[in-house]
Every structure is written in structure tokens, then in C-alpha cells.
Image (cartoon, rainbow, N blue to C red):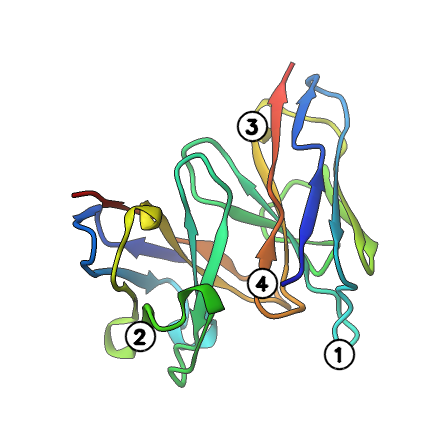
Amino acid sequence: QVQLVQSGAEVKKPGASVNVSCKASGYTFTAYYIHWVRQAPGQGLEWMGWINPNRGGTRYAQKFQGRVTMTRDTSISTAYMELRNLNSDDSAVYFCASLDSTTNHDCWGQGTLVTVSS
Amino acid sequence: DVVMTQSPLSLPVTLGQPASISCRSSQSLVYSDGNTYLNWFQQRPGQSPRRLIYKVSNRDSGVPDRFSGSGSATDFTLKISRVEAEDVGVYYCMQGTHWPPTFGQGTKVEIK
């Protein structure tokens, strides 16, 4: 079945970087954009950016420009999100999602908890 | 950024009764291609979000037909015709017309 499986929880110190992976299966990985969305504890959803797995093009929310990099490896149907210079406000669950605006393709990863603490 | 405002933020409902959530955008969500990219997501407790509705009124696969979306331009509504226990959770509207995509604050649906 269509699914996205994310890497496990991470604990990082302030100033460090985190790399979250998102492995797709059950569909053609290059057919749909991968979006990254995060959710701070008890808070709502915040969209971070997307990557086009076909050509590798990316677009990031301005808030994360300069601190985030989204990449992919089509040979293993996996997308990655690296967030640098972490601070306590970055403690959140990070989700990848394969979404299409015009069709009923919708699939989310299970989420990766990133905790930033000294 | 486009601001998405949901109401109410908390919605206690009786099982079997209807429920309605409003979502208003600070700008029209009609895109230059004529489509309106307004989505509704459901997040059950402890789970990842899932999309229920795309382009205002199109149900995603596997979404029960008791969920329906409607609206236009800046005013949108998600309706549940008869609430079931499995509908408990937080519901978010999200616009994909303007950059960057933005979510509403979320509406928490609980059973009375």
C-alpha cells in the first residue's frame, strides 16, 4: 500500500542540525511532491516547504530559508529534510506528506519527534 | 501570508448530530487557473493528519460521505452530517492557492 516511513526520534543540542528521512513505497516516488510540515507540542500545523522528487526542485517557506535543505534520492525513493542551527522553538514533530492538489493522492509519514535541549 | 481563520476553535457535538466548521481566508483562494485550492485535514489524537477534502469539495479516497466541503472565494465550510465517535480530533483548513501554503488554527471536535 501507499506509505511513507520516517526516521526515528532525535534529541539535539541547540545549534546542531537534524536530518529526517522519509521513505516512500507503494506508488511512483517521482510522481508527487513531498511536503514537510511540522507541529510543535500542543500546537497546530506549520508548512515548511516541498521538494519535487522528479527534478529535485525545492521551495521553502521564508521562515526557514537559509536553515533548511530538502533533498531526495530517487534510487531508494527517499526524501530528506535537514534543519540547521536548531533552537528550542524547533522542538516539534516533523511530518513528510505526499500530496497532490488536483487528485486524491494523499499520504503522510508517521512523524518524527525532534527535541532540542541543552 | 494568507491568514486562515477557523471557527469555532472547539466544537462539542452529540453523536449522530451534524457538525459544521467555518474557514475564512484573508484573500480570495481562486487561482489563475480557475481552481480553488482549499483543503480540509483531520488529525485524530496521536495520529498523523490526513486529508479529507481537496479543491473545496472533493473527497479523498476512503473518506466517508458524511463529510462534505463547500464554499467559494474566501468562505468555506466543512460539514459532518452525523458525527461518529471516530470523528473526534482536530480539523484544519489549508490553502494552497497563494505562496506559502497556510493552515487554519484548527478546530477541536469532541463528543459531548
Residue A28: percent from left, percent from top: 41, 72
Going by the picture, which residue comes out furthest to the bottom?
A: A55
State the SS at label 3: helix
Mark 1 touching mark 2, by CB under 8 A? Answer: no
State the SS at label 1: loop
Of the residues tagged 1 and 3, which is closer to the observer? 1
Q: Which residue is mark 3?
A: B86
Q: Which residue is mark 2?
A: A71
Mark 4 touching mark 2, by CB under 8 A? Answer: no
Tell me the amino acid under the disc marked 4. Pro
> Rounded to the nearest whole Å, what is the CA distance between mark 4 and mark 3?
28 Å
Instruction: Tell me if residue B104 can be seen.
Output: yes
Q: Considering only vertical position in the picture, is A94 above or below A44?
A: below
> Rounded to the nearest whole Å, what is the CA distance between mark 1 and mark 4?
17 Å
- With B33 as the anchor, is B49 left or right in this view? left
Check if mark 3 and mark 2 are on a common chain: no
Q: Which residue is mark 4?
A: B101
Going by the picture, which residue comes out furthest to the top?
A: B112
Tell me the amino acid under the disc marked 3. Glu
Count neighbours of disc 1 (C-alpha within 10 A) and say few if under 14, some if 14 to 19, many if 20 or more.
Answer: few
Q: Of label 1 and label 3, which has the lower sequence position?
A: 1
Check if mark 4 and mark 3 are on a common chain: yes
